[in-house]
Image: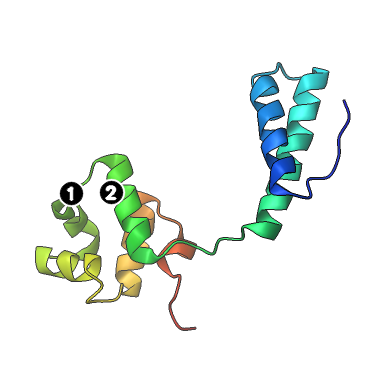
Amino acid sequence: MTIKPIRTDADLRAVFHRLEGIFQADEGTPEADERDVLVTLIEAYENQHYAFGPADPVEAIKFRMEQQGLTARDLEAYIGPSGRVSEVLNRKRPLSLRMVKQLHEGLRIPYESLLAGTRR
């Protein structure tokens, strides 16, 4: 196993290619150790070169809706009446702290995503 730093996107593609071949390696094998090291290198490279901030609150809600097959009507339990849900999803009303808490507890959307972009 020869491990080198990832310095370019070409290096990253090569590491991903290698990772595909060893991803299902059994724990305790040299390939599993290599896999773990490669994953750490990939994460470090991506964090340095492709830093993404937390998701936009509305996009986080829409993503969760898509994941769980939810409709706007399903959000009423967390946000309030249908008109309020529509205003939130159309960015005409910000999330209240109560809505944030309900969405986090009910749909497991991270607080970091629900509070992104709010003034501190």
| Residue, far front | 10
In screen coordinates, is 113 left or right of 68?
A: right
* Neighbourhood count class around disc 2 (C-alpha, 10 Å): few under 14, some 14–19, many 20 upward: some
Q: Is mark 1 on a helix, strand or loop?
A: loop
* Neighbourhood count class around disc 1 (C-alpha, 10 Å): few under 14, some 14–19, many 20 upward: few
Numbered circle sitting on residue 80: none
Q: Quadrant of the N terminus?
A: top right
> In front: 7, or 52?
7
28 versus 106 height, above or below: above
38 versus 85 height, above or below: above
Please tell me which of labels 1 and 2 falls first in the chain. 2
Image x and y of residue 78, in percent: 24, 59
**Residue depicted at x 73% and y 19%:** 27
Contact, mark 1 vs mark 2 (Cβ under 8 Å): yes
Mark count: 2
The three-letter code of the residue at mark 2 reads: Met
> In front: 46, or 86?
46
Q: Say which residue label 1 marks.
A: 71
Image x and y of residue 34, in percent: 79, 28
Q: Say which residue label 2 marks.
A: 65
64 versus 37 height, above or below: below
Image x and y of residue 87, in percent: 18, 71
In screen coordinates, is 30 left or right of 104?
A: right
Cα–Cα gap, marks 1 and 2? 7 Å
> In front: 26, or 74?
26
In screen coordinates, is 82 left or right of 116?
A: left
The three-letter code of the residue at mark 1 reads: Thr
Image x and y of residue 46, in percent: 66, 52
Q: Is mark 2 on a helix, strand or loop?
A: helix
**Residue depicted at x 71% and y 42%:** 10
